[in-house]
Amino acid sequence: MSAQKPRRSGVLGAALGMVGFSVLAGVLVTVMVTPAVAVTGVTATASINVFQDLPNFIEIGQQNSRNTIFANQGGQPVPIATVYSENRQEVGWDDVSQYAKDALVSGEDRRFYEHGGVDIASLVRAAISNVSSGGIQSGASTLTMQLVKNIYIQQALNIRDPDPKKQAEKQTKAIQEAQAQTLDRKLREMRLAIQLEKKYTKDQILLGYLNIAGFGGNTYGIEAAAEEYYGTTAKNLTIAQAASLIAIVQEPTARNLADPSHYAANKERRDQILKRMLEDQKITKQQYDEAIATPVDQTTVHYTKPTSGCLYANGYAKFWCDYVVSKVPDLTMLGSTPQERKDNWQRGGYDIYTSLDLDMQQVAQDSVQKWAPANETRLNLGSATTSVEVGTGWIITMAENKNFDNTGQPPDNTYTAVNFNTDYAYGGSSGFQPGSTMKPFTLLDWLKTGHGLNEVVDATPQPHKLSEFTTCDGNLGSNTWLSKNDSGERGPYTVMRATVNSVNNAYIQMALQLNLCDISNIMESFGLHSANGAKIQRQNPAFILGSSADTIAPLTMAAAYAGIANNGVFCKPIAVTKVVDVNGKDLGGETPSCSPTLVDPATAQAAIYNLKMNLIHYGDQPSNGVEGFGKTGSTDSYVQTWVMGVTSKVATALWYGNISGQVPLTRYSIRGQAMSQARHQAIRPIINAIAAKYGGDPFPAPDPRFLTGSAAPTIPSDIVGLSPDGARSLLQGLDLRYVDGGPVDSDLPAGTVASTNPGPGTRVAKGTQITVYTSNGSGATVPNVVGQPLGAAVQQLQGAGFSNVACVPGNADQRGQPSTVVSTNPAVGSSTSRSTQVQVQMSGACS
């Protein structure tokens, strides 16, 4: 049972109403300062003036409490982490056991419901103690006065300074002032306690105390204490549990239940509180006996260590948690300035709902940790993958191969605090060279400027002076750049084939026809930048191959490719879908921020048409038939490798390589696969799982104009038969390069052009090398003898200059019909040497 709670009808309540505040102040000061007057000669009147000059306003306010971060699993939000500066969860009046309320009043302030903030009877007792000791001693503090002190302690803990050392010093000083046994502090507490009693009801003050009080370590408030020490809620506390928790508040360090050595001290104080509860008729004798008989030991205390921060987050979401926390200064719903947002986050009480798909996250993390083991010792191996939703920018996965530890003292090298998926500002990563995953942005500019996928460029490695490249940055200098092709490719390549095979020198030839500034501007319109925040370094043409100093985060690359899939509309990557504050108010979340790039939808669709072949080429397309596109990338010696996998719904980037060092992946294998190709094994389960869940639509066919292009010249058909000088002049007029291929057998007059490579009618890029072959005059064209009898065919062939003719009999039943020529080898119409044997295939016998 619980005693009736009387309202403000006690001595102090009457004094406030009848005597007035100044007279009351005189009484309080006289009681408290008698020893000080004896020593210093300070008069009571002077002290009354001091009392009246003290601060007279304070609020209970919101206390620092937990922030909870949520992800999505099975279509429902699930908590993945709690992050807080103080382990507190504020609760309402009805969410606290009446036993805890009664234990607090009986144990700390039995006349709480009678006084008006200051208890005169207790003050008189304190004055007698003060006279005996000759100074200001503890005691006489009501719950309301203790609440004032705790509010000041909380304000001290909320002091902020850019310098952590100075912040700690300021906080310590303010806490010491809040706890100092001085006359000024006592008077201030009394003054403010009276003010609190005017502003709040008794129940509000009692609840405020229960929510603010310290219960040992970093645990504050009755709800967090109930969870930590008993694995229950404040609402469900038993009498014994409630009394044990209230026993902590006077001496949190000595009586908290985190350490078994404190159990005896806690029980001693608990039993005193239980006795008072019985005396105050808050519990029955039977309840008292049961509670007193309850031990305080490991059989009744169920201690759970508080787990604040991303170190204790869901095992699949630790790095994600760290990323979300790092974004707090960007979350405008938390405040108007970055500092205000950080301060509000520090106070806590927010539920942060995010876009992470925990089902897909598990697939992603399991895959990268399988194919890039965190304990690999042959090199500092890393892998990271991020998936971004097309058309919104919502991040749905963010996984890496290492384990998370932000203590500054990781157990071993399988742990790190660096988030390899993000920029330095959001996780400490410097990014990685992206290799050929940068090539699609040159392809986009190629198509945008009127070139076609079937245009031919010369893939043969050749040195180029940097001054040959067109740029808006002035002359790049006279240095020479020579790049190799990964598989030794040479000669003419269509742009489509060069993209599928990722031929470096073909792309260099393309870039020579473009403006480097236009290419870099397209990259930046898709959000590409180095992980340190720097722009693309376009002064080095190698940026088009992803082999310059640019180091890019997987999240940045995934968002860029999502922009291609989104018909050239780039959406900034976002993570927070909703924020709910401590009062349950929905503050909103991040909203998609999408804008057109420098590429129109038709151009993007043409590039996707080409890039679909890349995914098929490497076997990385979704297994359920959902259409996808992508690109691979690698740096010299396969130090870093990448693979992109994109559907119309989700874009995934996966990096696999050296965290530090330059160890070629070609040296080693992993799980029976070449380590340089392990990226494909790692991404396939991710792409398949995402395609199965999110689906995807077919990509539109490209406009035919993007196949042929309109900006490139076509090798004229009338080049055949020209003199070498005439052919050279014709090609140079088309900005093509003439290369002498030497003589070939031809029936054209000796010294004239017999053929070219690429051949007449081919659309090629400006600057392409055209190999020209001249006739040696010894060739002849095989005449059309199909359908003729053998004799007539031989006569016509000899007449054309072919003296070596052989007959090949057929198997057809002629039924009395003459045998005739079916085909020839070399074929009809082909040019070859007159000395070449021409085989005549007959329908029947050679007769």
Image (cartoon, rainbow, N blue to C red):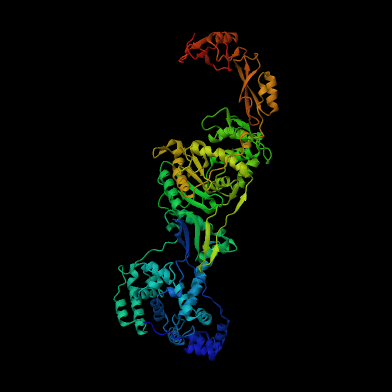
Residue 749 spot, x, y in % from top left: 65, 13
Name the image quarter holding residue 756. Answer: top right
Residue 299 lies left or right of residue 555; in this view the side is left
User: Which residue corresponds to the image point at 56% horizontal and 80% vertical from the top-left?
Assistant: 54
Residue 64 spot, x, y in % from top left: 49, 68
Q: 366 or 837, which is in the foreground?
A: 837
Q: Residue furthest front?
A: 816
Q: 160 or 787, which is in the foreground?
A: 787
Residue 351 spot, x, y in % from top left: 49, 63
Indicate whether 232 appears above or below 635.
below
Task: Say if residue 380 shows up in the picture.
Answer: no
Residue 139 lies left or right of residue 726; in this view the side is left
User: Which residue corresponds to the image point at 49% horizontal and 49% vertical from the top-left?
Assistant: 694
Number of on-image labels: 0
Q: 389 or 159, which is in the foreground?
A: 389
Indicate whether 29 appears above or below 541.
below
Q: Residue furthest bottom?
A: 18
Residue 422 spot, x, y in % from top left: 52, 50
User: Which residue corresponds to the image point at 33% horizontal and 82% vertical from the top-left?
Assistant: 284
Name the image quarter holding residue 344. Answer: bottom right
Indicate whether 158 appears above or below 846.
below
Which of the image's four quarters has the N terminus?
bottom left
Task: Say if residue 711 shows up in the picture.
Answer: yes
